[in-house]
Amino acid sequence: MKGITTRYLVTIIFTRRGGAIDLDDFNSHSNNSCIIPRSRVLRTSHANYVTDIANSQNFTREERLAFTLALFTQNDLLPIFDDPEVTELFRQIYFTKPELTKELNEINTQIENLQKVTLLSSEFDYTLLLSRFDTKRADTSLIGYYTAVQQWCDELAKRLDYYEEVKATTLSEFSIIGLSLAKKQKESPHLTPEENALLKARQEFFRKRFSLGLNSVKEKILAVKAQADTLESRIDEIDEGVDSLAELAELEKEPRAKFEFVAENTAKIVKNALKKIEFFEANRDFVQRAIGFWESWARDFVVFKTTRKEALKHDCEDDGIDEEEWTKWFGEWVNLRFAIEQKLWPVVEKGLLSGGVWSGDVSEAGEAGGGGASGVAVRLVEALEAYKKSVDVFYKEERKGIHQKFAFGQGAELQEKFETESALYKRVVAFQMDLQKVVFECEKSEDRIWILKWADSLLDISVDEVLGFVANVEQSNVSSVVLSEFAALKQKNFEIWLADAEAYGKEQARREKEYNSLIFKMKKELAKAGK
């Protein structure tokens, strides 16, 4: 090699007598000189490279050539040999081959990753799996189409099988829940059409949300594959006929979804199911309690419309209270209970859709400082349940006594109504105080506002009852001024106090005091009118 060209600037070092010879003659003992590529910028594993390369006593020719080769390869240098074929061979071995080997290794790694059966999740990127399919051929060839659809469905089914194997315990828990929800809601003859409709719709909501067995998902995937199988069979049948070309042409014209769309849609079906399962895993306690609420509330409402009605009937008849009277009370009781019943579904749905502090996600609740491990939704249902029970206690234990107290006095009907609503309003106040504890543990104002709007109709129900009753009583002895002030109670906007728990509490106490004061004024006006 009579000269060396490199990609970098190198220093040429000569022997004492100058001149230059081929490196092939490097072993000769003549005093001729040679070219040795050496520079401070070049890396080498030999600290004494110049000395070692010239020392023929301690190193063999092969060893010294290896030193020089290492110098070139370590510094990405390309020598130019006299023979162009040797130069090209060096390039192929030391430049092209390593690059191709690196690319091949990367492709092999990608292939291995694609072939692994990874555990599915709602974040499943179907496009990675899709990259293994020839989508262009699938959309231009019927045979390529049905083959791709079949293989795609098989791949999803295989991954679902693996998912079921790994998540066996979770899916078993969910199947137990699904069994109770699968039972058809029977209409009760003791409930009104509206009440039956509410219970049925509520069960259907829970069923859709918590029926998480993967069998239905597999059925949908297999239904898609069955259509691809049918397409294959039709082609096979056409092949047996005498007019196959025309029939194939007709078959080819039939509209069908593109393969990529089929893949995307089936992947969506899988991911939607997995989202429910993942929510259950992250919110087991909330889901189980929500199902418990659904079961106990549905059962209790049916019992309420039957046994409690009979209990009220016998209790009143023992004291000589007319059927017309106690039936009216039970009607009021039913209306209030149904109003409470209608609040269960929205708050559970809120917990399911929002998650986090609403469903009781401990990490998020801890970060936000709201809800605690029980979750906002559960605490609201518990407050609602406490309110419901207090209403039941009133009608079972106090309502008859109020009637007996005013039965024969002046303005008995209005006096009794005011006393009844005043007692029920105390339950409303207790319910609102329970809500207040939850409201001010929520950091987000939108959560606070949602709770107030959710409870709004219950908070005003006593005011609405009084105003509606008075409006229906002919020639009311209550002044229009007092009625106007009472109606103004509905216009109190608690949302403006949501930034300050103390101010909210004061406003609530002031509203309660104003309510009681107006009820007293109404009673007083009725008493004066009776003199």
Image (spheres, rainbow, N blue to C red):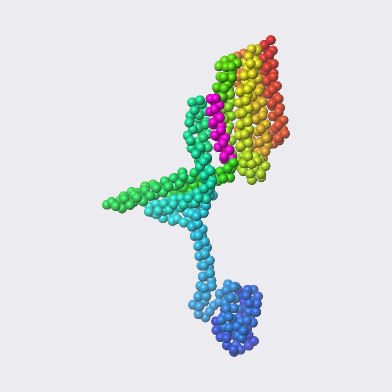
Residue located at (50% from left, 36% from top): 204
Residue that sits furthest to the left in the current view: 242
Residue 412 is drawn in which quadrant?
A: top right
Q: Quadrant of the C terminus?
A: top right
Residue that sits furthest to the bottom in the current view: 30
Residue located at (53% from left, 34% from top): 202
- Residue 293 sits inside the magenta stretch: yes
- Residue 23 sits inside the magenta stretch: no
> Would you say 456 lies left or right of 199 here?
right
Q: Quadrant of the N terminus?
A: bottom right
Q: Nearer the viewer, residue 443 or 191?
A: 191
Residue located at (70% from left, 24% from top): 514
Q: Nearer the viewer, residue 339 or 449?
A: 339
135 lies above or below 33: above
Residue 492 in view here: no
In x, y percent, where is residue 137? 41, 55
Q: Nearer the viewer, residue 311 or 408?
A: 311
In x, y percent, where is residue 511? 69, 27
Magenta region's main secondary structure?
A: helix
Residue 503 is drawn in which quadrant?
A: top right
Residue that sits furthest to the top in the current view: 531
Residue located at (63% from left, 38% from top): 376
Q: How many marks?
A: 0
Q: Which residues are magenta?
A: 286-307
